[in-house]
Each structure stands twice: as C-alpha cells, then as structure tokens.
Image (cartoon, rainbow, N blue to C red):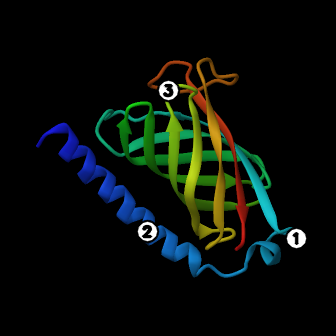
Amino acid sequence: MNNVSGFLQATFGLALAAGIAAMAISMAPDVVSAQNDGKSKADVTFTKWVTDTNFPAFPWDMQGVVGGDAGPGTFTGEVVNQVTQGTTTVIHALYHFNGQTHSFTADLFITKDETTGHGEVTLGVVTNGWLMGSKVTGGWDTLATCDIATPGNIFGATCFKGTLEISHF
C-alpha cells in the first residue's frame, strides 16, 4: 500500500468513527445543568503524558492529573490512533478523568498543529460517568519541559496541559 492510499484509508476510518460520535452527540440529553449545580458548562483541567511501554504500537497509554470542576484527581487515557499529514495530526483518544468530585470518560477527536504543538478538540462526547452524553470542546498545549513530575514519561519531560469544556446542546 502506498503512503497516499494508507493515509486515505486511515483518514476514512477516523472520519467514520467521528461520524458515529457526531450521531451520538446529536442525540445527547440536556444533562449538564441538571448534574452540574445548575451551570450550563463545566471546565476540567489536565496535565498528561505518554507512558506506553509498547510504543509506537497503538493504543498509547497516558497518565496524568486533573482538576477544575472534576476536582483534584488522576488522569488515564489512550491514544487510539493518529494520522499525520504535513504539519497536521488528527488524533482519536479516550480520556478518563478520575476527580475527587466527578469522574467520566470522553471520546475525543483532536487536531494538532505540529508547528505550534497545540491540540484542539474537533469532536468530543462524554461516553461514561458524570455528564454522560454531553459535548466536549477545548484543547491542550505541548510543554517541552513539564512543570510537574511525569513518572513513566516515555518522552522525557514533555507533557500536554489543557482544559476541556463540557456543555449541552
């Protein structure tokens, strides 16, 4: 298979998964204000890094810390797949927030600009736990030298720090 064909197949697979996630989002109930003390959105913060021992084979394991409306806690996650074309990378990932106040899983499609290191959620939905069915937006920035300890980090001191916003439709 040549590079263009492989890229097209991978992109089609990501697009198909994104379409399915979009259908799930469009059917989501209006749950944010009911489960978030009357607020129409929730903000959760995180710092994450890659810890996978079988890198570069997918999925890649991640760990980290969380805060914001989820409360202080731990982050785990998986990069399910990613495709890079030029300076743009499309990432499919599962993020698991385990805060002292709230816990949930978000299924996310992220577009990363390789020139800036910024990742932006292009499609996301809470698939389990607190605020299930809600839309997720937000993003993260790449830090070449993380401001906290990153045990097991396979990329040295590099980490990703960001905020997700969870809202209803």
Q: Which element type, helix, strand or loop, lies under badge 2? A: helix
Please name the residue that numbered disc 2 is placed on: 19
**Residue shown at 68% from the left, 24% from the top:** 148
CB within 8 Å, label 2 to label 1: no
At x 52%, y 55%, the residue is 108
Task: State the residue in front, 64 or 117.
Answer: 117
The residue under label 3 is 153
Rendered image quadrant of residue 55: top left
22 w.r.t. 1: above or below: below
Mark 2 and mark 1 lie on one chain; the one further toward the N terminus is: 2
Please say if 96 is above or below 49: below
* Disc 1: which residue: 37
> Which amino acid, mark 3?
Asn
Residue type for callout 1? Asp
**Disc on the earlier residue, 3 or 2:** 2
Q: Return the x and y of residue 77 as percentages of the image width and height.
A: 50, 48
Disc with the residue nearer the chain's start (1 vs 3):
1
105 or 30: nearer the viewer? 30
CA gap, disc 3 to disc 2? 32 Å
Say which of marks 3 and 2 sits in front: 2
Q: Amino acid at mark 2?
A: Gly
Q: Residues within 10 Å of mark 1 (few under 14, many from 20)?
A: few
The residue sitting at 31% across, 33% down in the picture is: 56
Q: CA distance from mark 1 to mark 3?
A: 36 Å
